[in-house]
Amino acid sequence: MRELTVELGDRSYPIYIGEGLLKEASSYFIKHGISQKSPLLIITDSNIADIHLKTLESELAGAGFKTASVVVPAGESSKSLAMLETLVAKALEEGLDRKSAIVALGGGVVGDLAGFVAASYMRGIKFVQVPTTILAHDSSVGGKVAVNHPFAKNIIGAFHQPELVLYDLNTLQTLPPREVSAGLSEVIKHGLIWDESFVAWCEENAEKLRALDAEALGYALYKGCSVKAAVVSKDERENDLRAILNLGHTIGHALEAVAGYGELLHGEAISIGMVGSAKLGMRYGAPEEVYTITKRVLAKAGLPVRLPEHLDVDKIMEAMMHDKKFAEGTMVFVVPTAIGSVEMKSDVRIQWVREIVEQLKQEVQQ
């Protein structure tokens, strides 16, 4: 098992990464102060419930925890204010109090949604992240929780840190290949912003990662979580440094919104966005190899590097205007300067972005 800590003073918390942790969950919950007297609410989705929910419920119940569970439809559509209201009603129905905790069992959607329930219920109760996807190695760390609005992703949210992150690698073995590749997008992103050697390692081990080799996957998730933890520890609320974690997200979130939160998986949209950011970096003087390496390593991970032809450029640009990173009439982008290094640019010309979005339709899918 690998362990690391998100250093946030008295709100610091551990990330545990290993095999078989779901069947040992109660010991970790007890160790980190999750109450056995107050009810717990496990929130999961329709993809995960049949596979892992009973394991977690029986493990916690066997240790004396009072558990209730709710299953939401899989997919981004569940990250809504309507679903938030439904889950708060469930929490009230089950008698959750100020010492209760919400448990997020699932991928990024479940983690974001459950975390926002925990942040808003009784003005904030404890919650635990139990990620079951590769993509969630990013979203489960750092305390960003949110729901979507039809006009913008994650625009209604909060910062609410978990008590712990329990990452059982065995839960990843049931992921379909497309979900595996989508998750690797954020793993690679952490290398692109922070660690050149890790990007090279991801390229060399792409086949092992796609095949869910336990050792390779454990190392990759540890490295990705390490980058996320280091950044969050220095800038919890995205005042400056944390914004670098948004590499590829300005374009990527717009693509998700325009495609209707379904056609493109989050990691796929971010992959295309990172290729666009690398092209933008060339406008600021970054060497062309940053673009070529970025595109190559993402393609080796099975990710799209080309924008679907039918997506409307005007709608994509409009969606970007609703993004949290659009402020005071200028566009803010994370721009790579080298592999493993990025800068924030707040003076990005809208016309440049439009041209790059149009160029992304012409990319050759490797």
Image (cartoon, rainbow, N blue to C red):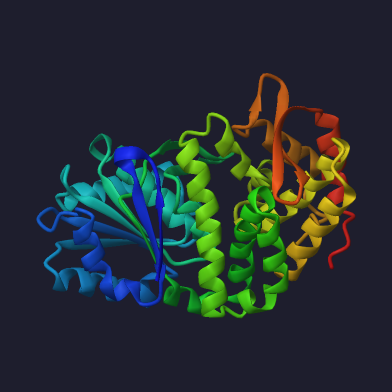
At horizontal 77% and vertical 66% (from top left) the residue drawn is: 299
For residue 49, say whether it is visible: yes
| Quarter containing the C terminus | bottom right
- Residue 247 lies left or right of residue 150; in this view the side is right
Q: Quarter-wise, where is residue 42 in the image?
A: bottom left
Spot occupied by residue 353 in the image (x, y as percentages of width and height): 81, 37
For residue 303, say whether it is visible: no
| Quarter containing the N terminus | bottom left
Q: Height in image: 364 above or below 277?
A: below
Q: Quarter-wise, where is residue 322 in the image?
A: top right
- Residue 290 lies left or right of residue 59; in this view the side is right
Number of on-image labels: 0
- Residue 112 lies left or right of residue 175; in this view the side is left
At horizontal 13% and vertical 53% (from top left) the residue drawn is: 38
Spot occupied by residue 125 in the image (x, y as percentages of width and height): 25, 43
Q: Quarter-wise, where is residue 249 in the image?
A: top right
At horizontal 19% and vertical 62% (from top left) the residue drawn is: 67
Spot occupied by residue 105 in the image (x, y as percentages of width and height): 37, 63
Farthest-out residue, front: 197
- Camera-side residue of 357 and 334: 334
- Camera-side residue of 208 and 323: 208
At horizontal 21% and vertical 59% (from top left) the residue drawn is: 31
Spot occupied by residue 47 in the image (x, y as percentages of width and height): 45, 70
